[in-house]
Amino acid sequence: MRLAGYNGRMYFERGRLRMEERYGDIGTGGSAIVVGGVKYGLKQVFARWMMDVPEVWTIDGGTLPDGRHWIRFLDGDDRYIVAFEFDDDFEILSEMRVDSLAWEKENFFISRTR
């Protein structure tokens, strides 16, 4: 069933645009984040949340002008690019999810069949 007025391609492109406007292009963030004066590698941040698992592939992270920190990763199970925003206490404040189709385009289906 197709939803009236639904354009899947534009939907994915809007999600990608929103994410890149907020956090920059994929891979342009850092490989570590300074939280409360302490430098943490991205895997260390996930370990604090008990999310340092093979299905989570870190991409990048950083700190926004308002002091919120962010970390972006690929959820290997769902194939979504995800960004968490969190505070100095590592409390997750928000989450943004965009299907990896927005970046993979025509390779999306090929890479999922292997």
Image: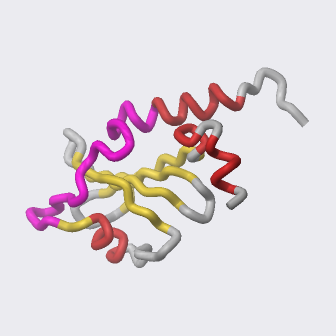
Q: Is residue 65 above or below residue 68?
A: above
Lateral position of residue 56 relative to residue 26, left or right:
right
Task: State the residue lying farthest toward the left.
Answer: 37
Lateral position of residue 107 relative to residue 71, left or right:
right
Q: Is residue 48 magenta?
A: no
The quarter of the rendered structure image containing the C terminus is: bottom right
Q: Is residue 100 above or below residue 12?
A: below
Report the magenta residues as a range: 18-39
Residue positioned 47% across, 67% down in the render? 56
Lateral position of residue 67 relative to residue 24, left or right:
left
Lateral position of residue 85 relative to residue 6, left or right:
left
Q: Position of residue 81 (x, y in %)?
A: 50, 50
Judging depth in this view, the residue of 28 and 96 nearest the camera is 28
Q: Position of residue 53 (x, y in %)?
A: 46, 76
The image quadrant that residue 14 belongs to is: top right
Q: Position of residue 96 (x, y in %)?
A: 48, 47
Residue positioned 68% across, 49% down in the render? 110
Q: Is residue 36 magenta?
A: yes
Q: Is residue 74 above or below residue 56?
A: above
The way the protein has been coloured in the rendering is secondary structure
Q: Is residue 8 above or below residue 26?
A: above
Residue positioned 60% across, 34% down in the render? 12
The quarter of the rendered structure image containing the N terminus is: top right
Task: State the residue lying farthest toward the top.
Answer: 5
The image quadrant that residue 71 belongs to is: bottom left
Q: Position of residue 3 (x, y in %)?
A: 83, 30
Tag count in the figure?
A: 0
